[in-house]
Structures are given as C-alpha cells and as structure tokens.
Image (tube, helix red, strand yellow):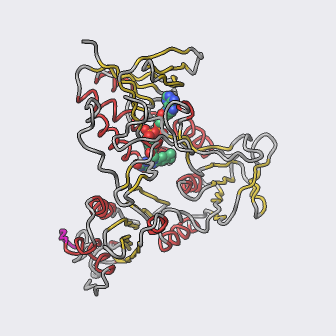
Amino acid sequence: MSKKQIVIVGASHGGQEAAYEILDRYDDVDVTVYETSDFVSFMSCGMKLYLEGKTTGQDNVRNFTPEGLAERGGKVVNNTAVTALDPATKTVTVKNVKDGSTKEVSYDKLIISSGVNPASLPLPGADLKNIMLMRGYDCASEINAAAQNKDIKNVAVIGAGNGIAAAEVFAKAGKNVTLIDGGHKPLENYLNDTYTDLFAKELTDHGVNLAMNTKVTGFAGDGKVEKVETDHGEIATDCVIITVGIKPNTAWLKGTVDLYDNGYIKVDNYFRTNVKDVYAIGDAVFPFSIPANRRVPMPSAIAVRHEAQYVVEHLFEAKPERVFKGLVGAQLLEAFNLHAVTTGLSEKTAKHIGINAKETVLKSRLRPDYIPEKDNPVCYISVVYNEESHQLLGGSTLSSYDISGQANVLSLAIRNKLTLEDLAEADFFFSPTYDKQWSLVNQVVQKALGLKLTV
Ligand SMILES: Cc1cc2nc3c(=O)[nH]c(=O)nc-3n(C[C@H](O)[C@H](O)[C@H](O)COP(=O)(O)OP(=O)(O)OC[C@H]3O[C@@H](n4cnc5c(N)ncnc54)[C@H](O)[C@@H]3O)c2cc1C
C-alpha cells in the first residue's frame, strides 16, 4: 500500500508541531512542509532577545532545521509558496518563489498553518525607506541593522501593544524613541488600568517618549522616512517600526476554503475546513476559548501547538473521537523591568462579549515583611471573574520578579472552570524563601471575596 501523502503549509510553530507529531505517531506517511521563506522556522518569539544580543545568534533563533526534520523522516521545501488548492483532484499548486516555476502536488491530508503577516499602514509615504514591520527573519535582520546604525538617532514605533518590545530594544540601543498609539495608554487592550499606568511609567522612566491619543496620518521624507505625520503634528524620525496588528495569509484560499470576511479560515470543532481532508490551525483560525465559551482570535505559539497536536491525533479518524476542548490563552507582556503575564479574558473583553465580569487587583510583597525590600519584590496579581457565578475567567501577574508560575496556576483554574471559592480553598506550598504565608493566588481571591487579609 502506498504511503499517505501529508502536505503541510507553513514551517513555523504549527507546521513543525504537526510534522513532528505525525512522524512520531504514524508509520505509513510521507510528510512534506512547504515554506515560502528562505530561512526555515525563524522564531519571532525570540526576536527581542536576539535584538538585545541575548541569543547565540540569529540563525539559531528557530523552532527546527530542515536537517532535524529529515532525521525524523520528513521534508521541508523552502522558497516555495502554496498558491492554490484543488479539492476535486486533491492537489495543491506549489510555486518556487525564486524562479517562478510551479507544479501540482497531491495530498491525502492537507494541514494549513500559514499564519499571519503583520499589518502595514497604507498611508501616504508608506513606501519610504526605513519603515519596517516586526515579524520573521528578514524583519529581524532589518531591525537589527537599524538598531546598530549610528546614523539612526530617532525611532518612531507605531502601536503600543507588541510595539513596546521594539521601543525597549531601540531605547537600549541608545536611540531617541517615540511610541505612538491612538489609545490612551500602552497595552490598554491587554491589561487593567493599574498595570497600564505602571507600564507607562516604566517606559518613560527609561526614556521612551509616549505619544498617546495620536493618530498617524502619513509619512514624509526624501527617499527615506524623516517624519511621521500625525493629527497632533509631525514627529521627526529616521526609522519607523509598525506594529499595528496582523492579517491572515489566506488570499490563496479565497473561493475554495470558506473564510470569514476578514480573511480568517472557518473551521469546525475539529479544525476541519469546509474542504474534505483539509485542516487549518494557528494564527489564521479562531480557536474555541474556554472562558469566553466561543471562538476568539488567539495568536500564540502555544495555541497552535495544541491545535496541531489535536489535529494529528485525530487525522485518520472518520469522525474525530472528541472535539477540541479549547484553550485559555496566555501571554507575557514586558518592558524593561516589568513583566506581566495575562491569561484568559481581560475584564474589558469579558464585558465586551456580554459577561458580567469584575476584576480584583492585589498589590503585595512576595515574601514576609521581615525580608528586606531589596529581596522582597512588589507583586501585583489580579483575577477576572463572573460576578454572579464567581467562575474565574482571567487573571494576570506583574512584577520585576518572575511570578509567571502564579499566572500558570490561574490558567489551569480557568481551564477547569474553578471559582473564587475553589481557589480560596486551594493549598499551595509556603516558604519565606519564595512567598508569603498565603500565596499570592490565595490572597487575591480572598480580596475578591471580601475577606480580611491576614498577611
Ligand atoms: C515579535 C513576535 C513575538 C512573539 N512572541 C510570542 C511569544 O513569546 N509567545 C507566543 O506564544 N507567541 C508569540 N508570538 C506569536 C507566535 O509567533 C505565533 O502565534 C505563531 O508563530 C503562529 O504560528 P503559525 O504556525 O500559526 O504561523 P506563523 O508563525 O505566522 O507562520 C506561518 C508560516 O507560513 C508561511 N507561509 C504563509 N503562507 C504560505 C504559503 N501560501 N505557502 C507556504 N508557506 C506559507 C510563512 O512564511 C510562515 O513561515 C510572537 C509573534 C511575534 C511577531
């Protein structure tokens, strides 16, 4: 019997996870991953560390190598875009982006993890030199060159969400950085007011100029960018980094695979598209969110890895044995010495989708009061919960110290639909080496329940 042909589109987190899981799980398969880029599997999650000089080198910031996949029995074909899908013949058209040649490739199962591209700003002057985006290997090279370039003195970063990473990189490189956003405060779409105020202070304390409530209207310059034009006047700059959102890489699927109006791929509870034997995972789909109880965008490396693992497990079942349970969604947001981990829904998002949500924020020190302040960092922790049922919907931590473990506890609690009362009763270890008599998680739910704190 001939081997099943598995074709995967995109060699990033989703493509790697799917390829490796298939090769580990099944024997009678040929796995080929098509990737439009030259460099295979640059890990954008590691871009900031690379730009700060904290990695072993740009070419090592990746998920996997073609050789690594070959050792497992799979193949990745780079510089090759999948440009069309023909469900009738179960083939895809693949195009060599270097020489333009095309060929048809048959599949028994097709897994699409073509992800997203950063959104650009189609404004006057957008084609000037030194206007950059921030995703993938080539952007990392371009941004790194700009950070090292002594002639670049002023940098404008547009988008105070993920843009805070770029602002930090350029400020550390000695540039005069202006962070521009139409919103009131950095990270306001992700975090509560207490945290966004702390981030605004952290950024300005480290020399980043904040231009909030500011709408960019265009760019000006002679060949290369010299000014950002805004509704509040001009900002002189030698370089612009745009981080204003993402758009799915799905134009090639139009007319074949059902898409939402914004281009995201429609999938069912098993990540099946409307086309038989064609699956879609990753940033270009909306997975089911457990706390939201509906599909929401969840662009994260770990989301796509869970999705890939699930799809592979059920790839050859006529009807998948179980539906995908869903995800919670968590991410790190950091600038200089502040590190926030947010999980599940923010209060704003929960209210937006009609949940009667409330957030309680606790400020505490990590360890008992007899520990000197220099060894006893200030910590914030919050919980977002349904006011009637007390079901935990979200939460976050913030400190200069690593308290991401507490955020992971909240993630697990959200996944298992625990209530404030459940968490108040949960017992965790105590040692003054690491925490207080009551853990931060216990303390914040005690506060949410209106209990008097004893520590
Ligand atoms: C700067 C930055 C930092 C991030 N940090 C984190 C983090 O710390 N933690 C975290 O969880 N997530 C992080 N993310 C998000 C994470 O990178 C994405 O969620 C994840 O990469 C999504 O994986 P994916 O497989 O869906 O798609 P993508 O990573 O978008 O990859 C899609 C791949 O498909 C290729 N492709 C697209 N179309 C075609 C086609 N037609 N034919 C062939 N190939 C194609 C693309 O070239 C690309 O390589 C970060 C993202 C960025 C930009």
Task: Name the residue: 32% across, 68% down.
Answer: 392
Kindly tell me whether residue 67 is visible in this rendering: yes
Q: Which of the two residues, 44 or 188, is positioned nearer the viewer here?
A: 188
Q: The C terminus lies in which quarter of the figure?
A: bottom left
Task: Name the residue: 19% across, 74% down.
Answer: 425
Secondary structure mainly formed by the magenta segment = loop
Range covered by the magenta-colored residues: 426-432
- 333 relative to 140 in the view: left or right: left
- 243 relative to 369 in the view: left or right: right
Q: Which of the two residues, 50 or 356, is positioned nearer the viewer here?
A: 356
Task: Name the residue: 32% across, 76% down.
Answer: 444
Q: Which of the two residues, 406 or 118, is positioned nearer the viewer here?
A: 118
Does the magenta run of residues contain 430? yes
- 92 relative to 99 in the view: left or right: left
- 275 relative to 261 in the view: left or right: left
Q: Position of residue 280 (x, y in %)?
A: 41, 36
Q: The N terminus lies in which quarter of the figure?
A: top left
Outermost residue, right direction?
222
Q: Position of residue 415 (x, y in %)?
A: 29, 58
Outermost residue, top direction?
1
Does the magenta run of residues contain 142? no
Q: Position of residue 256 (x, y in %)?
A: 51, 30
Is 46 above or below relative to 338? above
